[in-house]
Image (tube, helix red, strand yellow):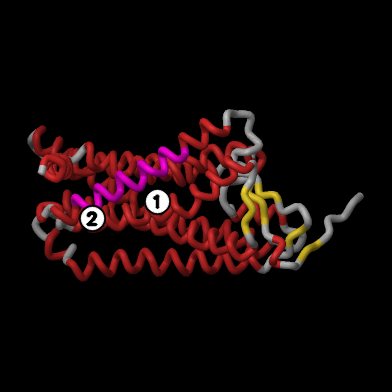
Amino acid sequence: MDIPKEITNVSSGFTLLGFSDFRCDHRAVFGVFMSVYLLTWTGNLLLLGSIKLSPHLHTPMYFFLGNLSIVDICFSTVTVPKLLVSLFQGGARISFLGCFVQMYFFYTLGNAENLLLSVMAFDRYLAVCNPLRYKSIMNTKIQILLVATCWVVSCLHSLLHSYTVSQLTYCEDRLIPHFFCDITSLIQLSCSSTSLADLLIHSEGSVEVVTPFILILISYLLIAKAILQLKTAKGRSKAFSSCSSHLIVICLFYGSVIFIHFRPSANYSADYNRLVSVLYTVLTPMLNPFIYSLRNEEVRNTLKIFFTK
């Protein structure tokens, strides 16, 4: 039995396979991902511009949505460029330091999106269930505090995991079957004990994902209860429409995250992981601004005014 040779030289780096090992037309796939990436930038910048230009959109909901757009732009930028390189070259080299820098920002931004979605659910809960006190509770100071908390928690969470995994010893085989430096893939490449990294993923990592999701569920259960108690159909329709866009985004994001991180290990497949990861790393950042803008009359009107000037 051959024992993998341990390598401690950090200059060795890794190779990201991306989708270069898939049997498909790589040029066509390259074109699709490039188009999606450009649409991500365009859609989110237009949404940010609309929020900036229209005084009607200077509300807590759009303050959080603006932050979500910034996260989405950065989130896709962390992964998509390397994915495009891997499709173009048949794999993408990334340095040891570069890999863990990418991992740090990937998990920081991913968790920031996770926490922002829970904050937005809380915002919708206050707007629907406590409308008379909504403005006094969700004041500017509270908005900034909530967003700052999301970023601080996300940065610390990502730093903990990135540092732990970076201390592992890696073997000669440094081929990552993914399009970014995924923590699970890196743990599988390690020659040293991964018990601490595994423990952190299944304890602290699970709490980081599950807690916001539970808060979102509670918020929307209370919202649903409040909507059902409204006497008029018009009131119910208006209350539901203010939450529907957010619900669609939540389903897209959490559907893929739960599939990857909470299915039985016996069903693990690197190929399926890559495909499902595309949903929340590439497609969701592109779809978010279009879901919110197409379903919101104020955003549509602002964009019409902007383009007809």
Coordinates of residue 147 in the picture (x, y in percent):
31, 64
Q: Which mark is residue 213?
A: 1
Q: Secondary structure at mark 1?
A: helix
Give the residue at x 49% y 44%: 258
236 with respect to 13 (left or right)? left
Coordinates of residue 214 in the picture (x, y in percent):
39, 52
Q: Is residue 35 above or below residue 58?
A: above
| Region in magenta | 33-50
Distance Cα–Cα, label 2 vs label 1: 15 Å
Q: Secondary structure at mark 2?
A: helix
Coordinates of residue 135 in the picture (x, y in percent):
12, 61
Crowding at dot 1, Cα within 10 Å, few <14 / some 14-19 / many 20+, comes out as some
127 with respect to 232 (left or right)? right
Q: Nearer the viewer, residue 123 or 189?
A: 189
Coordinates of residue 117 in the picture (x, y in percent):
33, 52
Q: Nearer the viewer, residue 255 or 75?
A: 75
Q: Nearer the viewer, residue 228 or 303?
A: 303
Q: Which mark is residue 150?
A: none
Q: Quadrant of the C terminus?
A: top left
Residue 194, picture quadrant: bottom right
Badge 2 is on which residue?
123
Q: Amino acid at mark 2?
A: Asp
